[in-house]
Amino acid sequence: MLDKVKELSEEVRLFKSVSKDEIESFRIKYLGTKGLLKELFSEFKNVDPALRKDFGQALNSLKKATEEKVRFLNDSLENSDDENGSYGDLTRPGEPIRLGSQHPISIVKNKIIDVFNRVGFTVSEGPEIEDDWHNFTALNLPEYHPARDMQDTFFIDEDPDILLRTHTSSVQVRYMENNEPPIRTVSPGRVFRNEDISARAHCIFHQVEGLYIDTDVSFADLKQTLLYFTKEMFGTSKIRLRPSYFPFTEPSAEVDIYWGLETETDYRITKGTGWLEIMGCGMVDPNVLKNCNIDPSVYSGYAFGMGIERIAMLLYQIPDIRMFYENDIRFLKQFKSVL
Ligand code: PHE
């Protein structure tokens, strides 16, 4: 009896066909209600009880193998395009290609870059693992400068000289070292700060910083660029500049846009003032120019920097910064359109 099962298994294994009818008669012959397997199953009761286990197992695997064979042959028939003309059903609707969506951080980053590209800024990038010089010292933050505490730093391997950049201003230092003015560049990228993670802050986030250096660049040029930017990005030129401090710019300012106070959310996110801070900026400190081999008696410039998450949260009304990094498909698929 076991031999019979083996014999059939071999037959099944060797069976080949590319025609629908042949496969169907094969299926009926083995698996049909009056098929060979049914017959063997009904023999089960006549088998010596000592051999029943082996017989049962062999029979079950034969059944499985036969079913799989039928499925396999039918599938390959449907997908085949050989010369027998077995193209499957050509009238079947095509498989839809699912379109992915861009991450909201990418959408907003590209929009910011696009706005600055239009007025002549190039894009520059640099390493995420930086040295002290490019992240701090060249930016007028010498060792032991208290303002280093404004950005809590991740150091690599306890080496105080190698760190994860805390801002993309480091890219601007590299750019100034390697390019002659006039310089107009924006530096997008990932930055790292040793901060507690909350709804409003994360230890990894993204920035776009900008740098403009030429002869006779004044604060008025900076302001005009900011007006253009906020108009393009948020549809408003109602901004205010609040005096602030950054070691690498002098004077420095914080840029607020007028968001309005129409809804309860507006009250919440603007803390009842209607104004929202969107970036820091200022005139590049002459010490920074000197550190990068640019003569401050000939050239001057402005710089600005903003967090992409913050802008994306405002534009899309996203309440929690952590949502950007969770990769929840229900969140991500909402961003199909480009701004
Ligand atoms: N580098 C600053 C920060 O990360 C932002 C900034 C850039 C401010 C350029 C002024 C000028 O907070």
Image (tube, rainbow, N blue to C red):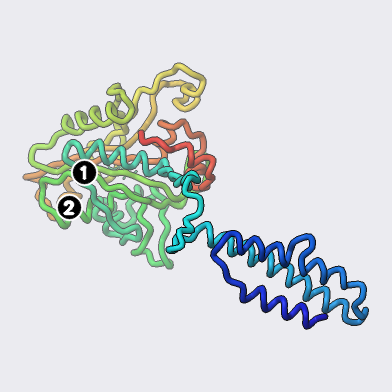
State the residue in front, 178 or 299: 178
Q: Furthest residue to the top?
A: 262
SS at mark 1 in the image:
strand
- Disc 1 residue type? Leu
Going 88% across and 77% down the picture, which residue do you hit?
52
* Image coordinates for residue 68, horizontal then vertical, percent: 65, 65
Q: In this image, 268 relative to 39: left or right?
A: left
Give the quadrant of the C terminus. top left
The answer to whether residue 234 is above or below residue 126 is above
Query: With respect to residue 248, does 219 lie above or below?
Result: above
Q: Which residue is mark 1?
A: 211
Mark 2 highlights which residue?
176
Residue 67 in percent (x, y) is at 68, 64
Mark 1 and ligand 1: say if the CB distance to the nearest ligand atom is below 8 Å: yes
Which quadrant is home to the N terminus? bottom right
Q: Residue at x 10, y 48 (%)?
A: 181
Q: Quadrant of residue 143?
A: bottom left
On the image, the x and y values in percent for residue 48 come to 92, 80
Can you tell me whether the CB of the residue at mark 2 lies under 8 Å from the nearest atom of ligand 1? Answer: no
Q: Is residue 143 left or right of residue 76?
A: left
Tell me where residue 115 sits by quadrant: top left
Q: Earlier in the sequence, mark 2 or mark 1?
A: 2
Residue type, mark 2 in image:
Met
Q: Label 1: how many residues lie within 10 Å, few (<14), some (14-19) or many (20+)?
A: many
* Image side of residue 8 versus residue 159, left or right: right
As helix, strand or loop, the secondary structure at mark 2 comes to helix
Mark 2 near mark 1, Cβ–Cβ under 8 Å? yes
Q: Position of residue 333 (x, y in %)?
A: 48, 40
- Mark 2 nearby-residue class (10 Å; few <14, some 14–19, many ≥20): many
Q: Where on the image, by quarter, is ligand 1?
A: top left
Residue 18 is labelled as: none
